[in-house]
Image (cartoon, rainbow, N blue to C red):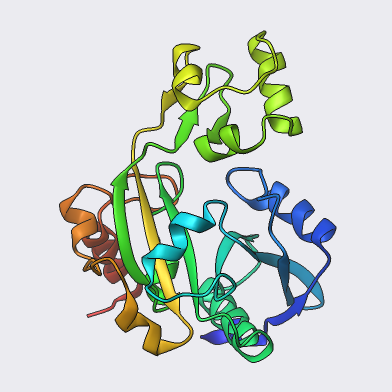
Amino acid sequence: MGRAKEIVIKVIPKKIADGFVKKHHYSGKVVQNSQLHFGAFLDGRLHGVLQYGPSMDKKKVITLVNGTGWNEFIELNRMAFDDYLPRNSESFCIGKTLRMIKKNAPQVKWVISFADGCSCGDGTIYRASNFVLTGIRENKTILLFPTGDKIAAMTLEANFNIPQIKELCNKMGVEHKYRTRAEWVKLGAKYVEGFQLRYIYFIDKSYRKRLAVTEIPFFKIDELGAGMYKGEKVTQAERHAIKTRKYGIL
């Protein structure tokens, strides 16, 4: 684990967390309904942020685990780190924040998160952190606009009055009003090629037996062509070979 063990995790204000995520997350955007913000500090300075909050489509997500109460699950909305942190920092920080949630919010039984296999990666960090893979599907949620903007369809349809949508309409020279994703497609938006992967971490291990969908073995990621790492299409097998050569792992 090396110097990763020296990282200190603290709860930080939303304003500070949002600013860091906008600067360091590949999307440059935050999830507006994030409620719990953790900062990762090393050598006295902030070098990482993890943000948790309710899922935007909570009524649908809650059905993934049978018998889950309305406030018994949470989503890891955003995770961003700068280049200062050492190897294994991401999995260390996830594990630390999950233990803090378990201690201080015992009503939370499981955590869901999504890996963006269209622009970022297929969830290597989640797998290293003992999350269970519960979904791999071709992207039908992230749209690429003629302006170059990438926006989740749920964001488009949830509240059209947010600044992001107003700015998009202004850039495209169209009336600022509510539109479905199909209407945006007619205006030139396209679904980003790739896959979305869904992961769940069970804080309360007994809830794993209640999973209403089938667990997916990790090798299915390569079988379906969903492998991605740091924005590049690459299989897990190829990554393992590179790591073996680099670190001399047998």
Is there any visible trace of residue 246 in the rendered image?
no
Residue 154: percent from left, percent from top = 53, 39
The image quarter containing residue 206 is bottom left
Image quadrant in which you'd find residue 238: bottom left
Residue 167 in the figure: left or right of residue 95: right
* Total marks placed: 0
The relative height of residue 191 versus residue 204 in the rendered view (above or below) is: above
In the rendered image, the vertical position of residue 250 relative to residue 111, given as above or below: below
Residue 22, given in percent of the width and then of the height, sits at 71, 47
- Of 172 and 75, nearer the camera is 75
The reply to whether residue 20 is in sight is yes
The single residue placed furthest to the left in the displayed view is: 223
* Quadrant of image for the C terminus: bottom left
Check the image and name the residue furthest to the top. 173
Q: Residue 121: x, y in percent? A: 41, 53
Q: Give the answer, above or below, for where 96 lies relative to 55.
A: below
Side (left or right) of 108 relative to 84: left
Q: Nearer the viewer, residue 26 or 113?
A: 113
Residue sitting nearer the eye, 150 or 8: 150
Residue at the spot x=62%, y=51% of the render? 25
Position in image of residue 39 (x %, y %): 73, 71
Which residue is pictured at 68% across the width and 27% down the height?
Answer: 165
- Residue at the image position 38 percent from the left and 71 percent from the top: 65
